[in-house]
Image (tube, rainbow, N blue to C red):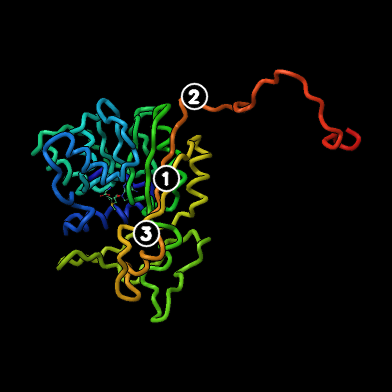
Amino acid sequence: MARRVAVDEIAAHNERMWDRLARAGIPYTRPQGSPPRDRAGKRRFLDEITRGRFGDTSFDGKRVLALAGGGGWDAILFAELGADTTLFDISARQLATVRALARRRGTEIDYVRGDMRDLGALGSGEFDLVFHQHSLVFVPDAPRVIREVARVLALGGTYVFSTMHPATFLFYESWTGKGWTPKQSYFSDRPVPVKQPVWEFGRVKVVAPTYEYAHRTGDLVNACAVAGLFVDGLWEWSPSYAGGPPGSDDALERILPAFIEIRALKPHRVARAGDGSHPRTGRRARPASARRPGG
Ligand SMILES: C[S@@+](CC[C@H](N)C(=O)[O-])C[C@H]1O[C@@H](n2cnc3c(N)ncnc32)[C@H](O)[C@@H]1O
């Protein structure tokens, strides 16, 4: 019997759903497109996947964690660009897809099956870069993931993660004919209800009611701060702004962002209480107005 890796029933359920989606081969479970063969082309292809969030950082010799990155090109391309790459995902099938493709290409990757909220299989400070795309939505407690990533990041490391935009997410499937109404409050911690749990790709349709959570922007940023990470970029975007028929996802994503993405850095030096203050070089008299009465 397979070892259980999910930390709770939510993850166990989503694991089953992702195995089901992967069996059907919908996008997100099959690497899309084919990267060029040359190094520069591979880098361009990977920069499109990562939206260039790693800038011109060389991946050669870096230790990279592709978190919940099953079914995509990212782990393979990081590895082929010289990174010592680990692919972590909860779905055995999502991992198997990448493993089969990597084997055909002669690309070496380490594979770990697990729940992103428990990175216990990975050592502290083991990674220079963590790329984590579109999957925080599948766990209720994003701060726990961010804390775990902060632990496995090396000093000076970078974490790039994206998820469904927490405001826009509430409006999918909510068109009334006149406008959109949120499915629940922005302040709710409950999974966002899904009316039609059918994932469609061309003629392939799969019923896979995954549990999905909208993580408030402030909570994501504050979770980074609490974990000792420094947010140096936050982006909100939609894959297309072309629009679509009234009430469609495309129409919604023309006026509201589909995704939110954050880049967070682990400082080279661990901050300690008192850091950030500068030693006094000279005594300055406090203005009288600053004196506490009776103080
Ligand atoms: C939308 S796909 C993203 C795949 C890939 N990163 C990409 O962007 O093409 C979400 C991935 O998250 C994984 N996943 C869902 N819940 C997870 C969890 N609790 N821990 C680790 N991976 C999880 C799924 O198995 C799936 O591979």
Say whether residue 51 is left or right of residue 155: left
Q: Position of residue 225 (x, y in %)?
A: 52, 39
Q: Residue drawn 30% across and 71% down? A: 244
Q: Residue furthest bottom?
A: 177
On the rendered image, what quadrant is the N terminus found in?
top left
What amino acid type is highlighted by mark number 3?
Ala
Q: Which residue is mark 2?
A: 269
SS label for mark 3: loop
Label 1, residues with CA under 10 Å away: few <14, some 14-19, many ≥20? many
Q: Which residue is mark 3?
A: 258
Total numbered labels placed on residues in the image = 3
Label 3, residues with CA under 10 Å away: few <14, some 14-19, many ≥20? many
Q: Residue drawn 27% across and 63% down? A: 208
Q: Compared with residue 122, is residue 172 higher up or lower down, i.e. above or below?
A: below
Q: Position of residue 199 (x, y in %)?
A: 25, 64
Q: Compared with residue 184, is residue 111 higher up or lower down, i.e. above or below?
A: above
- Distance Cα–Cα, label 2 vs label 3: 35 Å
SS label for mark 1: strand
Mark 1 and mark 3 in contact (Cβ < 8 Å)? Answer: no
Residue 278, label in figure: none
Q: Residue drawn 18% across and 49% down? A: 31
